[in-house]
Amino acid sequence: MTKRRDFLKHAGMAGLGIAASGMSWLAWADSAQRATASAGVPTNTGIRGKVVVIGGGMAGATVAKYLRFWGGTGVEVTLVERDAYYTSSIMSNLVLTGQRTLQSLQIGHDNLRSRYGVKLVRGEVVAIDPASRTVALGDGTRLTYDRLVVAPGVDFDVLPGLETAAAQAKVPHAWKAGPQTTQLRNMITAMPNGGVFVMSIPAKPYRCPPGPYERACVVADWLKKNRPGSKLIVLDANPGITAEVHTFTEAFNVTHNGVIEYYTGVSISAVDAGTLTLTTSIGNVQGHVLNVIPPHRAGKVVTGNGLADAGGRWTNVNVLSYEAVAAPGIHVIGDASATTQPKAGHIANQEAKVCADAIARLLAGGQPDPAPVTNSACYSPITADTASWLTAVYAYDPTTRTMQVVPGASGEANRPSKDNYEDMGKWFTTLMADTFV
Ligand SMILES: Cc1cc2nc3c(=O)[nH]c(=O)nc-3n(C[C@H](O)[C@H](O)[C@H](O)COP(=O)(O)OP(=O)(O)OC[C@H]3O[C@@H](n4cnc5c(N)ncnc54)[C@H](O)[C@@H]3O)c2cc1C
């Protein structure tokens, strides 16, 4: 296993392109704004082209920034984002326990415009026309592109019983940070002593493999201290814990023993939002709070535009450039693409950089880097003041044409610790600054 002190090296803090800082990433944004105006301004590299990016999340914001940074002033980048600001899902489990506010996870896209010259368009892309190389927004606006980058994140299956907005409000997934996160926090604080919190985990692949286990841990920790006698039931559709097996097995069986009950291979066939009861393969399960995380698929702009050629849910891509295998000129990055890498914010940032580099090379008449390397890192709080971590380095394997884990450069923390919890804040600050500032 990798030693903690080696983590930042493995996790590539330097590779993220910005120094670690103890300040909040909003403070980072402010100080960056005040810093020398030329720090991030692209120069003229001679490369020319028009790129439209759909989605200003972890993947989309990064690719827009680095396309300008590396491509230069001749690469016109337009970022279309439907929301006024981004709310990070990373760290949002700590909103459930009151350790962070949702506002502390929100950031706008203005730095991308003021520092890098990215054009920002507020709206939702509803249609992609590869023949005319245009996208259409909900308000009728059309944008043309030489290359399109699609980074919409995920959408969720609608389980029987959760078809209406009213039912979804009673049984939130809170797996995309926003109003549902606040809703779930309110439901947890309204629980009685001796209450029951039931959560479900969908079959792989889903966003943030350790995330649901992390949620179980921090909510169990909060319940133990604030709602004595409560229990937390985890219904996992997978045959076992999907990430950081050693850490979460210990956390469930020892640290949160007596609070967490963990069941594997459980499928959910219906949800009764009125009685807060789940119909499952192990019988009916009722709770004071239901937190059902449904199976995922790529955002609607992918599935609705014929781009979901991987099981009808994701896009198959060439990982040298993230160009869709079946749609030349269209690149799909982040959670929406089907790769061997996890669906996670850190890897979305990395995929975006490989994609930005490849597009700059292609626009210049060259070919993508034939040997890209990416890195994934994830911190998981286990209690209110301890955390664990997991990291992996991936390198391109020309035989399988996939990204494969580099042996010896990957690992997980030996045990959760307070030091790890502190490092978690630095990692998050650094990742968000690299993406949005
Ligand atoms: C509880 C939780 C904890 C997590 N913790 C971690 C962690 O510790 N480490 C980690 O690496 N990852 C973590 N993740 C996962 C991480 O949040 C996602 O993997 C990451 O956000 C994916 O980035 P993305 O750019 O693909 O999608 P997103 O970040 O979701 O961004 C997609 C953006 O596209 C926009 N959009 C979608 N469709 C359209 C459209 N048609 N037109 C215009 N805009 C559109 C959306 O509004 C959104 O802003 C966590 C996730 C959760 C839920």
Image (tube, grey):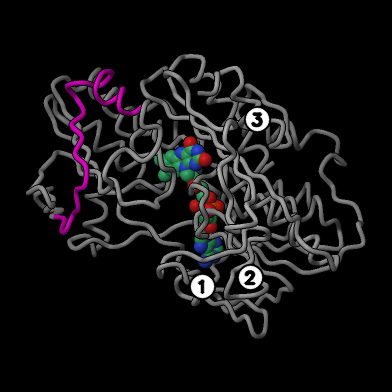
**Label 1 neighbourhood size at 10 Å, few (<14), some (14-19), many (20+)?**
many
Q: Which of marks 3 and 2 is nearer the N terminus?
A: 3
Residue that appears at 20% across and 32% down: 232
The answer to whether residue 265 is above or below residue 8 is below
Q: Helix or strand or loop: what does disc 3 sit on? A: helix
**Label 2 neighbourhood size at 10 Å, few (<14), some (14-19), many (20+)?**
many
Q: Is residue 33 magenta?
A: no
Q: Distance between the residues labelled 1 and 2?
A: 9 Å
Q: Where is residue 170 drawn, in percent x and y?
A: 22, 50
The answer to whether residue 207 is above or below residue 76 is above
Residue that appears at 16% across and 59% down: 269
Q: Where is residue 7 drawn, in percent x and y?
A: 59, 24
Q: What stretch is highlighted in magenta?
A: 247-271
| Residue that label 2 marks | 330
| Residue that label 3 marks | 27
Report the mark closest to the observer, 1 or 3: 1
Q: Helix or strand or loop: what does disc 2 sit on? A: strand
Q: How far apart are marks 3 and 2 (CA)?
A: 35 Å
| Residue that label 1 marks | 307
Q: Can you tell which quarter of the image residue 358 is in?
A: bottom right
CB under 8 Å between discs 1 and 2? yes
Q: Earlier in the sequence, mark 1 or mark 2?
A: 1
Residue that appears at 63% across and 44% down: 374
Q: Is residue 261 magenta?
A: yes
